[in-house]
Amino acid sequence: MSTAVKSYAAVDLGASSGRVMVGRVGPGSLELTEAHRFPNRPVRMPEGLRWDVLGLYAGVLDGLRAAGAVDSVGVDSWAVDYGLLDADGALLGNPVHYRDSRTDGVAEKVWAAVPPEELYAATGLQYAPFNTLYQLTAARGSAQLAHAEGLLLIPDLLAYWLTGERGTELTNASTTQLIDPRTRDWAHGVAERLGIDLGMFAPLRRPGDPAGVLRPEVLEETGLAGPVPVTAVCSHDTASAVAAVPADGERFAYICTGTWSLAGLELDGPVLTEESRAANFTNELGLDGTVRYLRNIMGLWLLQECLRAWGEPDLGALLLDAAEVPALRSVVDAGDAAFLAPGRMPERIAGACRDSGQPVPATRAEVTRCILDSLALAHRRAVEDAQRLAGRSADVVHIVGGGTRNALLCQLTADACGLPVVSGPTEAAALGNVLVQARAHGMVGDLAGMRRLLTRTQPLTRYEPRGGTRPWQAALARLARG
């Protein structure tokens, strides 16, 4: 293992912002600094909701310029979305946003060809209307797909523009609903029955694989001196974040919080039972042959949309006010697809409470407390269900990601789950990205060693549960009746 300190650029793209972080890794040391942060603003076009992927790429180049000399670059992003390439490798239009309405009603078409229970048994992925499989089915017959010769998931597309080399990183590919989690290869039978051409995808890569070097034009644009290798990381941001969970041993649950909450367990193999499918759990692939057994929850998207509707008030003051609101006065199903689309979120939450016969939150603090109680309740349900379905117990819940800044949510999650919560690191996806690069270059050891380094070097906060779980169980029962 190397004794020198090396620097790694982590391109980490979330659904609302992107950032280029620089991680410096040495023997027993790990430091992360932000080089550049930029917004990720989807654009509503006449044809639907689209990503401004060229703006994102410009932000990446600006970030690499600000990062300075680095020993490697890795790219991670959100999942399921993709760009189509023509025969010359040029992008065919802006990638469609997963919140676009084009997949409305598409699931029934898919299930007519591959019933949902067969689809789950083959891919282990929970139903989500925006999974790549449904997007490709919705795109069938479109001019873009007809002219496409290649398909790259978002982080692979950016890596292609940086290097000129194509690949499909496995942890992100596992979110397409086209990967068999047992073989860790394409689910050829599913794709064939749905008429999806897997030949459009580039060859699979694993985390740690080389992904090319920065093109001369990129070096000139960023001022970097080559060669600068690009390393495949866990390119699904959640996979990177789970790799950066500072856990000791196997008896832990995790919640990756941000726009989404991803709550579950890290397992050695998938859980493909019919009970697991009915509970809407997903089996996505992680580092070193692990499976991320988790449930997608709407997450802080609910609060982000309310803040946008309210004109971006001071969040700290709002959380202080929310902490004074009586607990569990009103709750909603944080996983309800009714909250998926943007717009009018406070009114939609109030309407859901009204329809279920609960007190309607009337102030911003009451709406905020309703959201946070509802998220904590969803976290409890996911952690309980994951343990039951996988036959694995957890002694602690690790919260990583942007939600670690929300102390009230962390405490409420500990209260709801009846388990201690360890909060941190906040920039888990970027840290996981950095550590996979560092490991590929001999700077750190195995996954357990990565996690020991995180525990020693990153600030963590522990929340103990308060007040017993009986009120939370009663709230769950009330929500089920509603």
Image: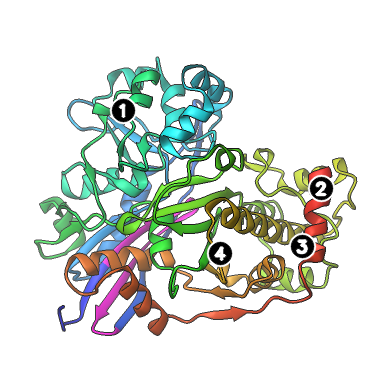
The residue carrying mark 1 is: 188
* Mark 1: amino acid: His
Report the front residue among 29 and 213.
29
67 vs 425, left or right, is: left
Mark closest to the chain's N terminus, 3 or 2: 2
The residue carrying mark 3 is: 369
Mark closest to the chain's N terminus, 2 or 4: 2
Magenta-span inclusion, residue 477: no
Report the front residue among 179 and 333.
179
The residue carrying mark 4 is: 393
Instruction: Look at the magenta stretch and give its main secondary structure.
Output: strand
Mark closest to the chain's N terminus, 2 or 1: 1
What residue is at 62 percent from the left and 54 percent from the top? 382
Q: Position of residue 418 (x, y in %)?
A: 69, 70
Asked which secondary structure carries label 1, the reply is helix
The residue carrying mark 2 is: 350
What residue is at 23 percent from the left and 84 percent from the top? 27
Residue interval drawn in magenta: 9-28
- Mark 3 or mark 1: which is in front? 1
Mark closest to the chain's N terminus, 3 or 1: 1
Cα distance between the residues tagged 2 and 1: 45 Å
- Mark 3 or mark 4: which is in front? 4
Q: Are marks 3 and 2 in contact (CB under 8 Å)?
A: no
Mark closest to the chain's N terminus, 3 or 4: 3
Q: Are marks 3 and 1 in contact (CB under 8 Å)?
A: no
What residue is at 48 percent from the left and 28 percent from the top? 118
* Mark 3: amino acid: Arg
